Amino acid sequence: MKAVVINQYGGRDQLQEKEVSVPKLNNKDVLIEVHASAVNPVDIYIREGYFQENIPHQFPVTLGLDVAGVVKEVGASVSKFKVGDEVFSRPDIARNGTYAEYVAVDENFVAKKPANLSFEEAASIPLVGITTYQSFIDKAQLKQGDKVLIHAGAGGVGTFAIQFAKSKGAYVATTTSEKNVQFVKQLGADEVINYKTTDFSEVLSEYDIVLDTLGGDIQEKSIKVLKDGGTLVALNQQPAENLGKEKNIKASFIFMQPDGEQLQEIAELIEANKIKPIIAEQFSLSEQGIRNAHELSESKRAKGKIVIKVK
């Protein structure tokens, strides 16, 4: 099968198109014929070698952590899916990736594709969807009426997180640039801060939850807007051990784990039209296509998710 792989860690020039073997199935695996994949910032970090001490990879490595496609084969012990099912998934980060024509995934990481989405739209959902779910539900115990601040609301996680929080009855503030103010309001944001002209920590207060997608000094400033006992969930930088202790802030880092049941709950929200996918741009499954997709991701200018059309 065709795949785009890396043979060593490094820059975009390490991404190479190659013929590789179709992955073999374990008893609980489904083989998904990939119709669409997506590019996430974590793909860049893996490509550059930041996670090599934590994630055991053997070269060549196929990147990609989102997939939507059709089940082509099932392992001997699979009970949840059958050949022909349209599915989507965030696969195991340590196994075969999704910049490929086929991927093998444990059935517990798979969910039925929302019937009202194309494969390309569905492929934009799993990683950001489960990340948001685990941040708001597992970590922050989001409830109706909570005040939530989501940083970088026009990004891949932000566009999903705004809609998810609104679907749960939260009041949502977000930060973005001036050109995206109307865009994030259309997603449901109640209050929008233009980060280029306004310091969010000077105008917001008494928030229950902050979703920090940025790190750096944003984390420390976010403590100012949280009420006593509030929650900060960080996605790309481990909070300092004593961050927010004077206000009893619960600050934690999340590295999401694949979960098919949570993804199925997200699918139900999508089928109920409470959340819609936001696609920034589509690229092809080719050496140049994936390199261009990574370049766009690294620019941090993508509005929504970057999708790879495979079939």
Image (cartoon, rainbow, N blue to C red):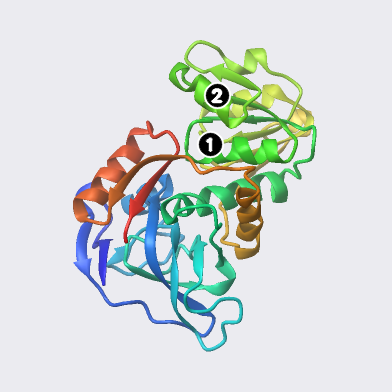
194 displayed left or right of 245: left
> Can I make out residue 66 in this image?
yes
Q: Depth check: 204 or 276 in front?
A: 276
Three-letter amino acid code at the position of disc 2: Thr
Three-letter amino acid code at the position of disc 1: Thr
The crowd level at tag 2 (other Cα within 10 Å; few <14, some 14-19, many 20+) is many
Q: Residue furthest bottom?
A: 76
Compared to residue 182, the image places residue 146 above or below, namely below
Q: Depth check: 30 or 18 in front?
A: 30
Closer mark to the observer between disc 2 and disc 1: 1
142 displayed left or right of 78: right
Q: Which residue is drawn at 51% across and 71% down?
A: 85
Tell me residue 241's x, y (percent). 65, 40
Tell me residue 63's x, y (percent). 35, 59
Compared to residue 174, the image places residue 290 above or below, namely below
Q: Which residue is drawn at 59% across and 26% down?
A: 174
Q: Identify the residue under disc 2.
A: 175
- From the image, which quarter does the N terminus lie in? bottom left
Compared to residue 208, the image places residue 35 above or below, namely below
The crowd level at tag 1 (other Cα within 10 Å; few <14, some 14-19, many 20+) is many
Dot 2 or dot 1: first in sequence order is 1
